[in-house]
Image: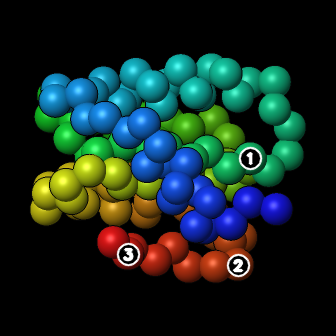
Amino acid sequence: MPDKKGFQEALGAGYQQSGGLSPADEALDAANTDMLPFQGKTALIFVGDGQYKGTDPVAAVKRLKDNYGENVCVYPVLVGGGLPESIATMKDETEWGRSENRRDEFKWSR
């Protein structure tokens, strides 16, 4: 069974920062479309560095919630340097993407 350590190791394997801004909203909107055939509860794990100037990933998470409601829970995973604005963006994604039915509370750790 996967665990936190294994997940962290997998993220570290071959991780290379691209050095540019990512179109995170486009990726989340694509996930929104990809999830159309899904039924029931779904978790979306979104891995990123939080550097999305000029895009609006929080709005994309809101669109996911508008479409799927409590059937989707978005778990953003911050990788990279952890700039204050990056952390704030990922926290906003967490706030909008969480499910009220979650049993555990999301914790930020480095």
Q: First in sequence, mark 1 or 2: give its number.
A: 1
Classify residue 27 by image quadrant.
Answer: top left
Examine the rendering and report whether any part of residue 101 can be seen: yes
- Sequence-earlier tag: 3 or 1: 1
SS of the residue at dot 2?
Answer: loop
Residue 42's disc number: 1
Q: In which quarter of the image is residue 52?
A: top left
Report how far apart the C-alphas of labels 3 and 1 lie in the structure: 23 Å
* Quarter the N terminus occupies: bottom right
Q: Is residue 96 left or right of residue 1?
A: left
Task: Residue at 38% x, 75% y: name it.
Answer: 109
SS for tag 3?
loop
Q: Which mark is residue 109?
A: 3
- Name the one closer to the observer, 20 or 105: 20
User: How busy is the neighbourhood of tag 1: few (under 14 within 10 Å), some, or many (20 plus)?
Assistant: some
Q: What separation in Å lies between label 3 and label 2 (alpha carbons)? A: 18 Å
Q: Which one is closest to the eye, mark 3 or mark 2? A: 3
Query: On the rendered structure, is 51 left or right of 9?
Result: left
Residue type beneath disc 1: Thr
Q: What residue type is labelled 3?
A: Ser
Q: Which of 21 and 91 is in front in this view?
A: 21
| Other residues around mark 3 within 10 Å, as few (<14) / some (14–19) / many (≥20) | few
Q: Name the spot of residue 9 as percent of width and height, x first.
A: 52, 55
Q: Name the residue under label 2.
A: 103
**Which residue is at the front of the view, 70 or 46?**
46
Side (left or right) of 107 relative to 101: left
